């Protein structure tokens, strides 16, 4: 109680010193952003406060976000003078997305720019926007000349005591597990995105991330080392991957957006804010960008691409299932047992399929998986892309980046820009999590940056953690962009899974990835009953709309996604102690239209299904049983 009293008094003292200087409110009036500065002299430190609710009844959600940035030549934090506040401007943009959770997007916000200068009269602008689903802000050096180094960014988010938080320990692969906590007793570096449930408003959630990280900065992380309830934006450290540690910038310059998605849990899951604020694509011809489902042999046969017969079997599987792609993973340059790469490509085309191929980034000498150096330089890439065009290869998977420094951001973008010239789709593994590039480079289909199904090959940990982990990903990692988890495995790999067949089937909908790699071995799909097999033959990998119907991080998830006039629903449960009866409502359906429903749920035990065929409309509700680690999938088509 004493500590709480001290905290209250401390915050009262801070607010007495600082006065509100500017505000901006979201178009729907549910989110308000206030900027505070030193009351006495209009100089000093500055911070942002985010509020959620309604006019006259806002709750402080993030009470304090410290502002400031430091260059090698001078500081822009402690002695900033507010010169003026720009007039509020309405941002209103409509755009189309080729993949992701929604095809028709709206980038709508209210924006205000704060114009600062430091004691040497050098200028810094802070651009703040309030969206219906969150808040974003970025720094801008508007002056036109100069090359500098960013020494530090002072952005830091104060998180109130008692806040539920879901955080992943920082790792360059971004393949860890999220931990649910109520305080910051664990002090370390954390991955993006970070999820929080407000302690003073049961309806309010927020997800902290960043967007539009391009050549002019590094990817960052959050750190609370040595702080109390404050998560600071941290640049890469010396030992974190290749390249120079501190970003080099040329003026004029804008930082990436700092993103705080905010609202109900559904607002978070359905948000496209990370893409909305990112740089639009300049590609004019996009017909060659064709998302889809692929068969993938690595999960069940770690060195399967060395074996022509394995490659052919997975091509046969894709053809049988109607999936357009099959991936040749690592070691395709060592293929034998009846054929080589050219033979395999020819066979894949004979099945009416489009091949995809894996590459080592070549950035790390200790990663010797072949082929190694074919993406490393512009000359390497041009030579390889010309070969791929002749072979009819449509996409590449590039692996092992393992760095968040500015040099690596440039390398990612170099690959994307060269690939676009040859109309080759790209996806990244061993990589950062999405920062909005799928809008800027729409031929970027997906990223790993997740502890996916391949971890069943690495040890026993995912066996026991997957049910809860799978129910955290829709509220964290998959919110910010496509996620190549490589889902839907019914058989076992090196370590068994304990999720039910219904749970695994549902992941094809619950997890969004523009290039969705179905990971099981051919017999895993061939032995399915007709209903789930048919479901997997037709489930899309891109969506026109997405709705969170119900769920709670780490416990259960029910997501509905629309493609054209048809809806797909995936539900998963992670409770290891009891079954769950999910009351499934269809109030998201249009008025006056009935639908034919195919419901594929858990059967009597975890390797069986129960299938029902019903007719439903907007007023319908049904109860669906999920096993302890179970799930269900559903397909709705108009009943014409």
Image (tube, helix red, strand yellow):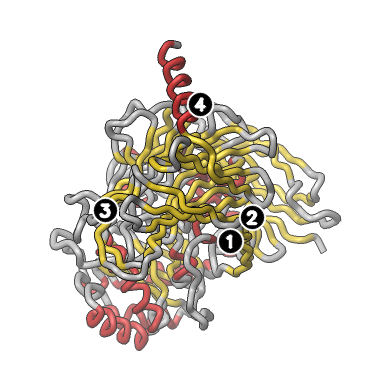
Q: Secondary structure at mark 3?
A: loop
Going from N to C along the chain, the mark reached first, 3 or 2, is 3
Find the distance from the CA under tag 2 to the CA under tag 4: 28 Å
- Which residue is identified by label 3? 74
Check disc 1 and report the residue beneath it: 539
Extreme top residue here? 2
Q: Earlier in the sequence, mark 3 or mark 4?
A: 3
Crowding at label 1, few (<14), some or many (≥20) Cα neighbours within 10 Å?
Answer: some
415 up-or-down from 423: above or below: above
Q: Residue at x 23, y 55 (%)?
A: 72
Q: What is the CA distance from the residue labelled 3 to the residue labelled 4? A: 58 Å
Q: Is residue 150 visible?
A: yes
Residue lying furthest left: 365
Is 418 placed above or below 360 here? Answer: below
Left or right? Give the position of 134 relative to 390: right
Ranked by sequence position, the earlier of labels 3 and 1 is: 3
Residue 414, given in percent of the width and then of the height, sits at 31, 73
Mark number for residue 134?
none
Of callouts 2 and 4, which one flags the residue occurring earlier in the amino acid sequence? Answer: 2
115 lies above or below 289: above
Screen quadrant of the C terminus:
bottom right
Q: Going from the N terminus, do you reach mark 2 or mark 1 first?
A: 1
Marks 2,4: beta carbons within 8 A: no
Question: At 31% across and 43% down in the image, what residue appears?
Answer: 170
Q: Picture quarter containing residue 350?
A: bottom left
Q: Which mark is residue 568?
A: 2
Quarter of image, res 378: bottom left
Q: Please, is residue 440 above or below residue 430 in the view?
A: below
Q: Residue 403: where, in percent of width, then height?
A: 26, 56
Query: Of label 4 and label 1, which has the lower sequence position?
Result: 1
User: Residue 136 location in percent, x, y?
Assistant: 50, 51
């Amino acid at each position: 109680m004493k500590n709480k009293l001290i905290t209250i008094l401390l915050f009262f003292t801070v607010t007495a010193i600082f006065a509100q200087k500017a505000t901006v409110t979201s178009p729907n009036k549910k989110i308000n952003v206030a900027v505070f500065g030193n009351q006495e002299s209009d100089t000093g430190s500055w911070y942002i406060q985010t509020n959620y609710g309604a006019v006259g009844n806002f709750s402080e959600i993030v009470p304090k976000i410290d502002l400031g940035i430091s260059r090698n030549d001078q500081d822009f934090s402690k002695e900033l003078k507010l010169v003026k506040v720009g007039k509020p401007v309405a941002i209103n943009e409509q755009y189309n997305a080729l993949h992701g959770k929604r095809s028709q997007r709206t980038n709508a916000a209210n924006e205000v720019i704060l114009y600062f200068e430091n004691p040497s009269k050098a200028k810094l602008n802070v651009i703040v926007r309030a969206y219906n689903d969150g808040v974003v802000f970025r720094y801008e050096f508007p002056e036109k000349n100069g090359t500098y180094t960013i020494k530090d960014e002072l952005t830091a988010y104060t998180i109130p005591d008692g806040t539920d938080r879901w955080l992943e320990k920082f790792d360059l692969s971004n393949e860890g597990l999220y931990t649910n906590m109520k305080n910051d007793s664990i002090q370390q570096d954390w991955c993006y995105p970070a999820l929080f449930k407000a302690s003073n408003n049961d309806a309010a959630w927020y997800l902290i991330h960043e967007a539009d990280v391009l050549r002019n900065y590094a990817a960052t992380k959050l750190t609370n080392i040595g702080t109390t309830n404050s998560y600071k934006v941290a640049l890469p450290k010396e030992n974190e991957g290749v390249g120079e540690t501190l970003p080099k910038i040329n003026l004029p310059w804008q930082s990436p957006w700092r993103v705080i998605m905010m609202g109900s849990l559904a607002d978070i899951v359905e948000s496209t804010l990370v893409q909305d604020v990112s740089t639009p694509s300049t590609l004019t011809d996009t017909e060659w960008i064709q998302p889809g489902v692929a068969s993938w042999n690595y999960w069940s046969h770690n060195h399967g691409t060395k074996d022509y017969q394995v490659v052919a079997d997975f091509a046969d599987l894709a053809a049988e299932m109607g999936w357009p792609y099959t991936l040749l993973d690592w070691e395709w340059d060592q293929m034998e047992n009846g054929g080589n790469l050219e033979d395999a490509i020819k066979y894949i085309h004979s099945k009416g399929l489009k091949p995809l191929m894996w590459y080592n980034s070549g950035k790390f000498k200790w990663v010797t998986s072949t082929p190694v150096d074919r993406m490393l330089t512009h000359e390497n890439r041009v030579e390889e892309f010309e070969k791929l065009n002749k072979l009819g290869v449509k996409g590449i998977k590039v692996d092992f980046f393992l760095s968040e420094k500015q040099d690596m951001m440039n390398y990612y973008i170099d690959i994307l820009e060269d690939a676009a010239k040859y109309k080759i789709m790209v996806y990244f593994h061993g990589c950062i999590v999405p920062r909005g590039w799928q809008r800027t480079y729409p031929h970027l289909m997906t990223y790993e940056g997740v502890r996916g199904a391949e971890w069943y090959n690495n040890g026993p940990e995912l066996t026991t953690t997957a049910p809860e982990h799978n129910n955290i990903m829709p509220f964290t990692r998959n919110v910010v962009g496509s996620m190549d988890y490589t889902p839907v495995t019914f058989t076992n790999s090196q370590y068994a899974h304990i999720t039910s067949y219904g749970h695994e089937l549902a992941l094809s909908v619950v997890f969004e990835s523009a290039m969705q790699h179905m990971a099981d071995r051919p017999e895993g799909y061939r032995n399915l009953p007709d209903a789930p097999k048919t479901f997997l033959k037709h489930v899309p990998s891109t969506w026109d709309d997405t709705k969170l119907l119900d769920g709670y991080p780490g416990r259960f998830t029910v997501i509905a996604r629309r493609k054209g006039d048809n809806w797909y629903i995936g539900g998963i449960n992670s409770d290891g102690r009891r079954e769950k009866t999910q009351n499934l409502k269809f109030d998201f359906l249009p008025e006056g239209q009935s639908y034919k429903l195919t419901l594929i749920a858990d059967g009597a035990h975890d390797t069986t299904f129960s299938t029902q065929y019903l007719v439903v409309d907007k007023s319908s509700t049904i109860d669906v049983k999920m096993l302890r680690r179970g799930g269900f999938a559903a397909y709705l088509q108009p009943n014409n």
